[in-house]
Image: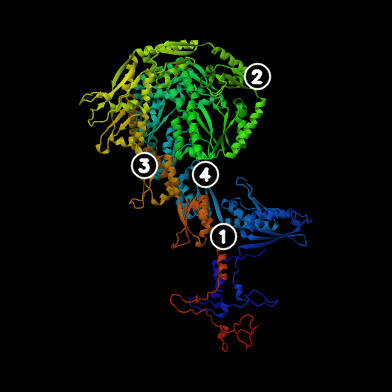
Amino acid sequence: MSSVAVLTQESFAEHRSGLRDEEITGGTPEDEAYIPTYLEAFPPLPEKGTPGEKSGEPTGAWSKIRPIKASVITQVFHVPLEERRYKDNSQFGEGEEAKVCLDIMQRTGAHIELSLAKDQGLSIMVTGKLDSVMKARKEIVARLQTQASATITIPKEHHRFVIGKNGEKLQELELKTATKIGIPRPDDPSANIRITGTKEGIEKARHEILLISAEQDKRAVERLSLEKAFHPFIAGAHNRLVQELSQETGARISIPPPSLPKDEIVITGEKEAVALAIAHIRAIYEEKKRKTTTISVEVKKSQHKYIVGPKGNTLQEIMESTGVSVEMPPLDSGSETIILRGEPDKLGPALTQVYAKAKSVMVMEVTAPAWLHRFIIGKKGQNIGRITQQLPKVHIEFTDGEEKISLEGPTEEVEQAQAQIQDIIKDLMLRMDYTEVNIDQRFHRHLIGKNGANINRIKEQYKVSVRIPQDTDRSGLVRIEGNPQGVQLARKELIDMAQRMENERTKDLIIEQKFHRTIIGQKGEKIKEVRDKFPEVIINFPDPAQKSDIVQLRGPKNEVEKCGKFLHRLLADLIENSFSISVPIFKQFHKNIIGKGGANIKKIREETNTKIDLPTENSDSEMIVITGKKGNCEVARDRILTIQRDLANIKEAEVTIPAKLHNSLIGSRGCLVRSVMEDCGGVHIHFPSEGSGSDRVTIRGPAGEVEKARKQLLQLAEEKQINNFTAELQAKPEYHKFLIGRGGANIRRVRDRTGARIIFPSPDDPEQELITIVGREEAVRQAQKELETLVKNLDDVIEDSMVVEPRHHRHFVCRRGQVLRELAEEYGGVAVSFPRTGTHSDRVTLKGAKDCVEAAKRRIQEIIVDLEAQVMVEVAIPQRYHRAVMGPKGSRIQQITRDHEVQIKFPEREESTGVEPSPQENGEASPEAEFVPRKCDIITISGRAEKCELARAALLTLVPVTVDVEVSYDLHRYIIGQKGSGIRKMMEGYEVNIWVPQQEQQSDVIKITGQVANVERARVGLMERVKELQAEQEDRALRSFKLTISVQPKYHPKIIGRKGAVISQIRKDHDVNVQFPDKGDEQQDLITISGYERNVEEARAAIEQLVSVLEEMVSQDVKLDHRVHARIIGARGKAIRKLMEEFKVDIRFPQPGSEDPDRVTVSGLPESVDNAIDHLLNLEEEYMMSVTETETMAAYMKPPSRGGGGGDAESGVPAKGFVVRDAPWNAPGNKAPDMSSAEDFPTFGAGVAPKQMSAWGPKKF
């Protein structure tokens, strides 16, 4: 094995300066001006001695220089053949040995070389860092060498010293000797230690273990068995006596705690110290045994804990004040006897104290019904909390199911608490009552309501508590508690609800699932409106995964019927508004259709009242989907197509293909035409709508692609025409619109049933009576038969006439013939024709089916009767209110005219003349002057008298009114909100105008103007907002509780934590604000906590607990060479953070420029600090090896100074250079060599003539 030398700072200094002065010069003192001799500065190399010469004395100065330890070391060791584990020599270097070595190299990082000796022994060379080499060596011995074992016996108590702290000593020993050492467990009586490894390693390990045992033999362990009763006298009050004894003697004394039934006292330490401690302990024991006596007293078992006190402090206090030991019976025994042991004259005062402590606390019970307990406690413990705050030493305990309350604490305080609780019980018994009602368990969830809505309403309305049993209880008993009147009312309502549920009915509605989400609305807003309208009806939609169309209604019969009709009407509106058109628009133009900030698309949506959906940017689709009413969708489509045409040079071509082929060309779900569009570069192909009769197909896109698509369509049409079946039907042109039906409804039904396409002639076709049917033969035959039946029915159409006075004609034809359209829609498409204006004819013609014509005639007569009974009513409303009465775009007036079937005419607007009419409030004249109507104020209503009166009343309700609301000026800014958002939201929500006084007015009056109903809703909403703000103010007042605690500033960073982690957690857990003092504050120790009082107290307790932990911590300085600080800290402090987390300590390094750059401070619990310092010192030793090696290499590699580095730069004195004494050139007859001479210092390669000998000896060339 190679020898290893360790380089220290001292040896390094010796190496740099030569041998120590005292060894060469015989003790010459060191001096800065000291000039070394030539032999000291340039010691001669050692000469080779004769073979017989002893080398005990040094042969030269070089032998005194210590070798430098390399960071990489090499160890070589030999494994004899008989100890080799793998002896197969057929493939040396490729067998198991090579695999094992490769695995060890990968795991340890050491380099291993194997060689085979002539005797078939194995030579192993291991190279690497010291730690890696030692680990590799241990594994090699364990895996390549056969193992022997031996047993060594040392005293059992010495085993723990072999193991060391956390097993570190044992690990070090195993690594050092390359063995496995097995030590028996503490509960194993065996003292044998088993060592496994090589013979050499076993011997080394045996030697080391025996050394450790021998060292421990110098220490002593003694055990004294003394009566347990006298242990308190040896320990003293609060263990002070035994601590003083330990400090005085230096021995460690371990006395078993009172709870442990052992008499043995253990003393450990140096033998002399142990003997001294034993003498002291025996002296105390003998004295107390001789002087003390005992007395026994009986005390109730329940009072023993007050004599013991928290953590036994009361017993220690009695011991300290009287010197008497109080022996308590075990808690689990039934004995009530307490023994006092001490000197006779001290037993009396001790007994007095025992009785005083026993009676200092009393237990009392208060009787109260179990159902009252939670009311006595109060909401969130408010009632009982007030008592415990006033009387903090009283403990109050409630027992579930029992009618008693236990009080425990000092006698006076318990009596006060008892009185207060009895007062609460008396008050509750006077104003509280309870009742129980049996309701079938299947109704319980309906009583509770969704999210507890029903039961919470009852609780809030009647101020009661309702307890409904859990489903698992299988009980129908509902308990109601509260004031007697509220209990009875709540009971009645619960019974009524249960009876209603017994009489309820269930109805299923069939609504297509695609409409469910629309009816429910975003976040359930729309269905909430329906539920509010029908609160007694429960509406259940199926789960989307069920794919069901059944919506279930449950509730009272009448309400369920009303709700069902309402949902049917809602569904009809949805179907009408769900018409959809897909418009193909080239992808590059989508952004232009959207417009800047969505301006274009928003405008189209608003003006056409449609929903327009564009595909996402990453989608390949070009389709824009328009949804809404059919007419509106077509208008929106045309506007979008116009934008595309204006943006690009898109060619549009039309191709004529018979309409009967359109369906077959489009294909199933448009698959055929879509394939043509994709094949032709994404052109758009538009077929005319069904029923239009047009043969023109529009192709839009780039010029070349349009032509290609045209050819493909014509080719497909030719193929389809050959395979299609066609039939023709004759029908009068006037029948065509009846056959088609409103919106194509009739003809669509025929097409859906048969699958045939029915084509009606266009106005330009020469054959106006010819109807074409295209499709499969059987489908065409069936459609033909149905159409012939319809035509036959239409042959029953008659034409009739009636007389209508010309003065009434205008009513029927005005508003673009709206009344006539309504008649046609209501009476089966009957056609009503009035004579042209100016003909002065009173003959009106009606044409249609006989029944429809008769019904239409009756309806016209009713309208005429209404017109003749029509009257005109004038309503005076000031002109300034007209705009408000009309509503947005006249919507309110239109609603009144529809609801009451009247006509309303507003006067022309009169320009202001500069004279303001007297103000009018709430529809009445102000007190100052009466309202005098002007011509511009008169609104005319025409219609039936009774309906005009209803319309007049409806108009007057639309006149704005103003109310004043008193709101404290302090709350105005909160009502207005940030940048007016609050007040604006209220005005929009209630459709009113709200005026808040200016700041300088300091007024409390807020004015609300609008319709009566809206004003009232706004007033209620405003008052609710005021209540919320007042509640917030009260909450802020409660949250403003502040408390300051004094904490030493040095603990502040620890309380704050890294990046504020600790204090942030405290703030989060307790919902408080914690403020630390600023740097300039006078009182740097005060920490301010603000929040709810209870939370503040809890936060203070948390901080105080944290401080108590910090106070237990210690700080210790350790000297670590500043050159290793950076390596210990690691990159970005990663290494030091890991070390601090591992040892649970804080490590502080000195700042740059510090007076003591090597001082490092470690803070934490004492044991953790010691462990961390040990680890730091180990790291320093490891890193210093690398540092010294680096500095050594740098010193040797550093070029010599050529700029007079040896001189005094500051003083300007020229450097002397390197000066030595007794140099060869100083001898008589010699001279120093001339450095400028080419002869003394020749240039390489230059020949120089020989010269006479000098002190340097002959020159060699």
Q: Give the quadrant of residue 997.
A: top left
Residue on which the image places disc 1: 1182
Circle 4 residue: 263
Q: How many marks?
A: 4
Residues at marks 1 and 4, CA–CA distance in whole angstroms: 49 Å
Nearer the observer, 1147 or 19:
1147
**Looking at the image, do the residues carrying marks 2 and 4 touch, with CB atoms under 8 Å apart?**
no
Give the residue furthest to the right.
Answer: 90
Q: Nearer the viewer, mark 3 or mark 1?
A: 3
Callout 2 environment at 10 Å: few (<14), some (14 to 19), or many (20+)? few
Residue where numbered disc 3 is placed: 1090
Mark 2 vs mark 4: in front: 2
Q: Secondary structure at mark 2?
A: helix
Q: Secondary structure at mark 4?
A: loop
CB under 8 Å between discs 1 and 4: no
Mark 3–mark 1 distance (CA, rounded to whole Å)? 51 Å
Q: Which disc is residue 815 wearing?
A: none
**Residue occupying the point 54% across, 77% down:** 26
Which is nearer the N-term, disc 3 or disc 4?
Answer: 4
Amino acid type at image mark 1:
Glu
On screen, residue 848 above or below 1068: above
Question: Label 1: few (<14), some or many (≥20) within 10 Å?
Answer: some
* Amino acid identity at mark 4: Asp
Q: Earlier in the sequence, mark 1 or mark 4?
A: 4
